[in-house]
Amino acid sequence: MRRPTPIPQAPSPTAGASGAGGAGGRDGATPARQPQTYEASPGVTISPAERDETIAPVIPMAAPAALPDMAPGEQDAPDAPDDAPPIRLRDVWKAARARRKALRAEVRRFTVRQRRRRMLWIGTAASLLLLVLTTLAAAYSPLFGVERITVEGTSLLDPAAVEKALSEQLGTPLPLVDESAVKADLVAFPLVQSYSLEARPPHELVVRIVERLPIGLIKTAAGYTLVDAAGVALSTTETPTAGTPLLTISGGTSSAAFEAVGQVMRTLPASIRDQVTAIAASTPDDVTLTLGGTNTEVIWGSADQSALKAFVLETTMKSRPPATVTAYDVSSPAAVVVR
C-alpha cells in the first residue's frame, strides 16, 4: 500500500511570534497575527480552514493478521485466479483415467521387454535341445549303420579273416556297436595283443590291431608252438615254420631265462631279428643267438644294456658281415670281440 504524500507543515507560530516580538521589542508593540495561506498548486492558494476541510486525515494502517499454519509447499503456491472454472467430477475422473492409462502403458512396455528376452532364451534352448535330439536320433538310426569294416595294423594276421569274424556288427548303428561282442570275436585270434575301435561316419568301422611279437618256436608233445615274449602260445604246427627261430631254453616259458630271451628279441632291430634262426639260454646271463645259414653265433650274455648291445652289433655287422666271421661277442658292449 502506498504511503500518503506528506503534507507541508505550516510555519511555527512561536517562531513567527519570536520574530515579530523581536521586531516589536524594538517598536515596543506586538504586531497582530496575520492569517496564513498555502499554495496547493501553482497559482492557487487556500486558507488553513479550507486546507483542513479538503485534505482527509491520515488513518494509521493496522498490522497484517498472522496466517494460519500451512505446509511449506502451500505457502508458495499461487492463489487460484478468481475467474478459474470450478473443478468438476468428470474432470477428476478423466485425470484418473489418463493416469491409469499411462501407468498401464509403462507396465506393458516393461513387461514386453522382459517377455521378449524370455522368449529369446526359451527359443535358443529349444533350438539346442532340438539339435541334440535330432543328432541323437540320426546317430542311433540306420542312417549311420555299419556297412564296412576296415582292419588296420596286421602283418601276421589275415585282415579278411578278422573282418569276417566281425561281420555280425554290419547294420548296427555306429554308437551301438557292442565292444564286448567285438572283444569276444577277437579273442579267437591269439596274435591280437590289443585293439581299438574308431567310428568313421557315416558307415565305416575301423579296427586297429596291435599284434603280438612272436619270438620263436618251442618244441612240445603236440608239435612246434609259436610263442611271444610273454610266453603266450600263438599257434601250434606239426613241423617248424620257416623263418621262425627255434628256442632251446631251460625251464620253459615260465623261467627267468625265457624272460631274458624275450627282452632281447624285442630289443633287436628287424634287420637282425629276421636273421636269427635259433636262440639258446640255460640261465638269464648266457643268451646266445644263431644267425642265418652261416651259423654265426652272437654271444649276448644277460639282457642288461640290450639296447646298447643291439646298436653295437648292428654297427659291427656292417663292417664285418656274418659270412666273414664265426662269432660276435657283445656281452661287454664297450669291448666287442669278433672271431
Image: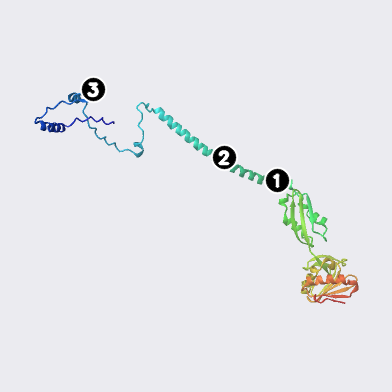
Residue closer to the observer: 273 or 185: 273
> Residue at left 58%, top 41%?
119
Task: Tell me the tag on residue 116.
Answer: 2
Is residue 307 in sight in this rendering? Answer: yes
Amino acid under label 3?
Answer: Val
Q: Is residue 137 left or right of residue 118?
A: right
Image location of residue 246, percent across then percent down: 85, 70
Residue at the limit of the structure toward the left, as seen here: 28
Kind of residue sitting beneath label 1: Ala
Dot 2 amino acid type? Arg
The residues bearing labels 1 and 3 have C-alpha atoms spaced at a distance of 124 Å
Q: Residues within 10 Å of mark 3 (few under 14, many from 20)?
A: few
In this picture, residue 2 sits left or right of residue 186: left
Instruction: Tell me which residue sits at (50%, 37%) in the image.
Output: 107
**Residue named by callout 3:** 44
Tell me the residue that label 1 is attached to. 138
Is residue 70 or residue 208 the one in the foreground?
A: 70
Q: SS of the residue at dot 1?
A: helix
Tell me the quarter of the picture where residue 190 sits.
Answer: bottom right
Q: Position of residue 230 (x, y in %)?
A: 77, 68
Q: Residues within 10 Å of mark 1 (few under 14, many from 20)?
A: few
In what quadrant of the picture does the C terminus appear? bottom right
